[in-house]
Image (cartoon, rainbow, N blue to C red):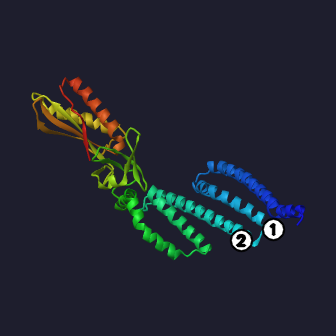
Amino acid sequence: MPVFGKMNIIEKSLFIPTVVSTSIIIILFIVRGIIVHFLKKWTAGSATTVHTAALRSLRIPSIFWCIAIGLFFALELSELPRKYITLVDRTIYILIIFSVTVAVANLAVRAFENYAQRSDINIPATGIILGVFRATIIIAGILVILNFLGISIAPLLTALGVGGLAVALALKDTLSNLFAGLHIIASKQVRPGDYIKLNSGEEGVVTDITWRSTTITSPAHNIIIVPNARVASATITNYELPDSRMSLSVQVTTPHSADLDKIEAITYEVAKSVVRELPGAVPDEEPSVRFNAFGENGIGFSVNVKIKDPGSLYIVRHNLIKALHRRYAEEGISISVPAPQNAK
């Protein structure tokens, strides 16, 4: 065969289809970028999260769709042998199935997340729940791809079952955290948004429960990451259950010679004024003053007020101690204040 004839065949079978396919893919990427840009501007002013969720869910799959369209046109223009055409054809179908699966998984996860936030559903939209939801849909898509390729699923599942024991032993800690996270969510005793304190000292608001760890935001706005297995085995104080309101107790000591009736009346008056003025306190709940101990340095008593949530603990305690100290100084009452304590 002449050299020019071979070059003509190569040109028809490879060069022209490759150039056309590459050009189409580049053009589609440019068009996709323009569309995404305008959709971002449109969703920025949207009052709902539906359009934003749809845009985020389709950004990655749209890349595969551009590549699939480019390969399709290359296949139509090529004169490749039948076996290569079949290979490219299957590649296109795999890209489409996989991209649609990813799009459906992203849309379903974001829809479930929005629904869980707006409704009273008992399943929290935590990282571990969303991850399992997404993984289930993607695994279903992979099984469809395997079935399309003619690969029998039953022997594959059997092989996975045989190797499952070795995988379980190798990933013992990971699986322990995974099932501990599922147990935490199923028990509903620790939920995202709850203010908790572990017996090891960590405390703060639970922001997420993932497949490996529980994320807690401390009062100092630091992130505390605790393995799920440790959370599941810990002694936990949940300040949100059964009620988010909690008691704040400030311990005070007054001399033995002090007029206890006068101190009780003044302390109650100050505490009543604080809970009435501060938004973090509960004005409907009456404060209390309780004498509770005879000590070497004096008589101990506690000032107890109700606050709305753990986030109000520090500001209410701060203002209560300041108000008490100011009033005691005005009345000439001698006191000593040990480290304040709080209880649910």
Residue that label 2 marks: 86
Q: How many marks?
A: 2
Residue 237 versus residue 157 in the image, above or below: above
At horizontal 62% and vertical 73% (from top left) the residue drawn is 148
At horizontal 88% and vertical 61% (from top left) the residue drawn is 3
Q: CA distance from mark 1 to mark 2?
A: 12 Å
Q: Amino acid at mark 2?
A: Thr
Q: Amino acid at mark 1?
A: Glu
Viewer-closest of 52 and 158: 158
Residue that label 1 marks: 79
Q: Position of residue 51 (x, y in %)?
A: 61, 56
Q: Answer with left or right where residue 149 lies relative to residue 295.
A: right
At horizontal 56% and vertical 59% (from top left) the residue drawn is 106
Residue 226 versus residue 4 in the image, above or below: above
Q: Answer with left or right where residue 163 lies relative to residue 333.
A: right
Q: Residues within 10 Å of mark 1 (few under 14, many from 20)?
A: some
Q: Residues within 10 Å of mark 2 (few under 14, many from 20)?
A: few
Q: Which quadrant does the N terminus fall into?
A: bottom right
> From where the camera sits, is residue 261 visible?
yes
